[in-house]
Amino acid sequence: MNAPPSTALPVHRTIPQAPGFDNSIALLSEGYRFIGNRCDELGSDIFGTRLMLRRVVCVRGEAAARMFYQPGRFTRQGANPPTALALLQGHGSAHVQDGDMHRVRKAMLMSLQTPASRARLVDLAEREWRLRFERWPRVRRQVLIQEAQAVLCRAACAWAGVPLANVEEEVLRTAEFSAMIDGAGAVGPRNWLGASLRRHTEQWAHDHIVAVRTGRPVDPESPLATIAFHVDADGEVLSNADAAVELLNVLRPVVAVARYIVFGALAMHDYPEWRTRLAGGDDAALEMFVEEVRRFYPFFPAIGGRANHSFAWNGLQFDKGDWVLLDMYGTNHHRATWPDADLFRPQRFEARKDNGFDLIPQGGGDPASGHRCPGEAVTVELTKSALRLLAGAIHYEVPPQDLTVSLERMPALPASGFVIEGVRPA
């Protein structure tokens, strides 16, 4: 029988320690600001604490991201809450693999993100948006998060080779993917709902994989075919279950982009001068705007890793198996990297080049070789396309509502979901 993880604090550490024996409750109550609050209080970008009774080192900032995303340094196995892993990645996915298995599986996923493939997905989403725009004037109010998730779900499924048959299936699949995303940062009912619905979605994906493998015609260039017939590093095709998991890992992140679209709409509402620029077709302004949306608004709070081997960093010794949490939200708001970090200023990206470690809303490092999200480029393009249309293709009003974004709730959204009314063609 394996011994339980040790909760003893290694005596050779010299890093500051957060007050309290265990800070799990504080993490749940403070949300995105948990790590940053303690870094600010301790005057350090690194500190030690316990979460779920396990010793963890929390870090933030560009230097910490470079340390964390050093190839081969950390494994994701046993490093993130199992409730979040089950909803956002799934067991048997590329996310929890290392070495050659991760490299080969990640290469397969990256092959789905060619410029031509991304353009096709964006075109499908734009078509769905325009169909929505035709219907919206006949309905008094729309909740943008719900509409954006439905648009992206339909587009993603059509792109992947598993088109939705009718409105009923669209509603069901959208609800399932949305519950997985919304439940990943929670404990209790939201997480239970996401887990329950995911089982239905996995069976749906499993049925598509089996159908293709037993002779159903499919576009050989589609993500469905690519995943179904992928040969892993061990020379074996994926099991039906693992192939279904990877199919969901291609579809669900597309639906999650709806959150950036809603945050972008919120930013256009709060900063109307930017909506005017975007409506005018200024693509350079749109690029800056979307990058600032991704930096400024909360998406993933943190990512965990366990050290694959001992190493030294900044005079500190890390041992094999040490658990480290990198503060993604805090790194995107670190004042040493981002002057006026708590202000929304798209112009900061006018001449800025991404170095892979200062802006990490979806992870850092090289997506081709590391654990950074392979769909980050398509996230940017889908968000740009949607905001361009919302700014220039329609007019709408934003009625009084609760638009506050609570950083205690993970994942975060405007409380109202961003309601619009009076939609009409521009």
Image (cartoon, helix red, strand yellow):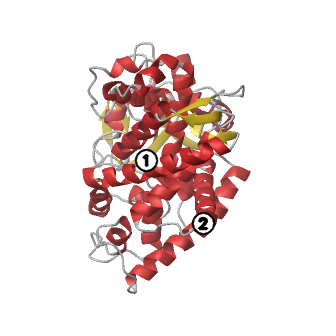
Q: How many tags in the picture?
A: 2
Number of the front mark, 2 or 1: 1
Q: In the rendered image, which residue does mark 2 sit on?
A: 169
Q: Visible in this render: residue 185?
A: no
| Circles 2 and 1: CB atoms closer than 8 Å | no
Farthest residue to the top: give it. Answer: 340
Amino acid type for the residue under numbered disc 1? Glu
Find numbered disc 1 in the image and state the secondary structure of the residue it sits on: helix
In the depicted structure, whether residue 302 falls above or below residue 269: below
The spot of residue 253 in percent (x, y) is 47, 51
Which residue is identified by label 1? 126
Compared across the picture, whether 283 is left or right of 388 comes to left
| Front in this rendered view, residue 137 or 158 | 137
**Amino acid type of the residue tagged 2 in the rendering:** Glu
Residue 357 seen in render: yes
Which residue is depicted at the point 45% across and 57% down? Answer: 156
Residue lying at 56% horizontally and 28% vertically, measured from the top left: 266
**Alpha carbon of mark 2 to alpha carbon of mark 1: how far?**
20 Å
Q: Position of residue 230 (x, y in %)?
A: 31, 72
**In the figure, 339 relative to 179: above or below?**
above
**Res 357 label:** none
Judge the density around disc 1: few (<14), some (14-19), many (≥20) Cα neighbours within 10 Å.
some
